[in-house]
Image: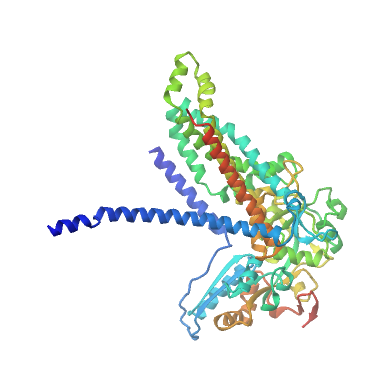
Amino acid sequence: MNKTVVGVIGGVVVIAAGVALYANSNKSTTKQDTQKAASSSSNLSGKVLALGSTALQPLAEQVATSFQQKNPGVTVTVQGGGSGAGLSQVASGSAQIGNSDVFAEEKSGVDASKLQDHKVAVVGIAPVVNSDVQVSNLSKTQLRDIFTGKITNWKDVGGKDEKIVVINRATGSGTRAVFEKNVLDGQNAVQATEQDSNGTVQKIVSTTPGAISYLAFAYLDASGIKALNVDKVTPDTKNVEDNAWPIWAYEHMYTKGDATGATKAFLDYFTTKDVQKTLVPKLGYIGLTDMKVTRDASGKVTKN
Amino acid sequence: MDNITQKLMQKSESTKKDAMGRAISLSALALIVIVVISIFAFVMSRGLATFFHDGVSVKDFLFGTTWNPSVVDPHTKQPYIGALPMIVGSFLVTFLAAIVATPFAIGTSLFMTEIAQKRGTKIMQPVIELLVGIPSVVYGFIGLTVVVPFIRSVFGGSGFGILSGTIVLFVMILPTITSMTVDTLKSVPRHYRESALAIGATRWQMIYKVILRAATPGILTAIVFGMARAFGEALAVQMVIGNAALMPQNLISPSSTLTSVLTMGIGNTVMGSLQNDVLWTLAMILLLMSLVFNLIVRAIGRRGELK
């Protein structure tokens, strides 16, 4: 009797834990449902495996689902694993598409000349603080000094007397690379707490007094955190489009050599105006068609 | 006549089955041995590449205190690959968790085997089995939402650090140590207890002079098993330790362990690059340590068998 009750409770706990685990692990979620849409106008078929960046994953999954509805013969599988994994898997030929937050040129150990870049979206990144921090604007120099460890108290930048708790993303993460490239000017970040996803950073900043970190725009809307203006510029989509807000990056889908067949069709579909104007902004990214500037791998910005 | 000779000369049905069963179990064994050997070979080959291929010195790796593999030191032209902060962090949380968990585990198992056998097995057994089954991500999540804010409000700081890691690991390895200790205590022969009581020992004297003494090797084995689990635990620790590759200043400063650096970094690096190789070297250290833990368990087992 006693044992059954405990067993049942145990079962419930384990199931709940399983659900939590599933919801948490966006790293291995695969979308393989080939919904049979009525409009099977195309007769494309084949399998496409796109893996890499976890920042691009939610968008890629949505686009893959809608692409498969239009092309029932094609199976698009989207996986996480990180930008590094994405680039090395596509370079070795085990995946058709390698998702990355950074240019392949910026990642050591990858032969970028063998890879073909396809930019599919733009993501903006903003510094965030715990909402108890009374500062709402920082100059770029102040921001740099905080992340390199020169400023360690909020009172030095006009806030109250409170220790600054710096929270970084993991070394090598795309978001961190973008932030450091645009803010730190080649200096090394202070060794501090590191977290491995936007979600965890959001949670920790919102609960730790005096915390500062940086998040993709899609994660800014949460209680307990506050996005900072830099040099009086607000982090929003409009400011990214004309490069007034400089902390942004492309999301890349790399192929080995030129894309062909189903892979090409998927990449073309990704960059259609339809997708760029609807799905992309819906998930918190910025559409390529809205951008008024272009940036190359070396960081040079040109007007469109 | 011929028929019988033939029958006798042939292999019988049972002999064939016997041979088949033997083949099946042998191939299962071979498969496992191959898997273990190839894991070892793979991790070793990748881990040693740091030293042979990338030319990092073993001393810098094991005793350096700055970890930032993607940045090169302007003076020495060597990347920052000092793994000491992680090695220290891993050992600290492991030993602290074992030190805290051991008295609780021994107390619980004594209660279950010596003091209240009926209630002990009826209530405690399922509870401990339940604790074993909880996935580590749940422990980590509870640690992040309960333990970390608690440490922050009591001791200040960010709440992330060795202390939070120790608390989470303590709960995780407690059931391992407890259930193994229970088994050891149960295996202490009944006549030890009877003899002790017969010559006038109280129950407490019997427990700590006879039973615990006889069970010491088993209890040590249990502790080492718990430590092995703590040493290899990645997810739960990563969520509460803060993941800063800094030498631990105190128990509440953010630190990191071998496993937390591994899980955070492996997806962000490219296979074959130095940044990736050094992570494999960390994995190699983990593997070697679990081997060491295993050897310790065997050594204890051989030396202290009940005679």
Residue under the image location 55 percent in, 59 percent down: A23
Judge from the rendering whether residue A269 lies leftward or rightward of residue B254; answer left or right.
Answer: left
Residue at (48% x, 41% y) in the render: B129
Q: Is residue B234 visible?
A: yes
| Residue A202 as seen in the image, left or right of residue A181 | left
Q: Is residue A221 visible?
A: no
Which x, y percent locates residue A303? Answer: 79, 81
Q: Nearer the viewer, residue B95 or A280?
A: B95
Q: Which residue lies furthest to the left in this view?
A: B1
Q: Position of residue A299 (x, y in %)?
A: 79, 74
Q: Is residue B221 above or below residue B61?
A: above
Quarter-of-image position of residue A90: bottom right
Picture quarter with the N terminus of chain A: top left
Query: How many marks on residues?
Result: 0
Looking at the picture, tell me which residue is in the foreground, A92 or B153. Answer: A92
The colouring scheme, among rainbow, by chain, secondary structure or one colour, is rainbow
Residue at point 40% right, 54% down?
Answer: B26
Seen in the picture, residue B146 relative to B8 is either above or below; the reply is above
Q: Nearer the viewer, residue A115 or B28?
A: B28
For the C terminus of chain A, give its image quadrant: bottom right
Would you say B104 lies left or right of B165 here?
Answer: left
The spot of residue A59 in percent (x, y) is 61, 71
Camera-nearest residue between A29 and A65:
A29
Rendering quarter of residue B146: top right
Residue B91 lies in what quarter of the image?
top right
Residue A97's place in the image compared with A20, above or below, is below
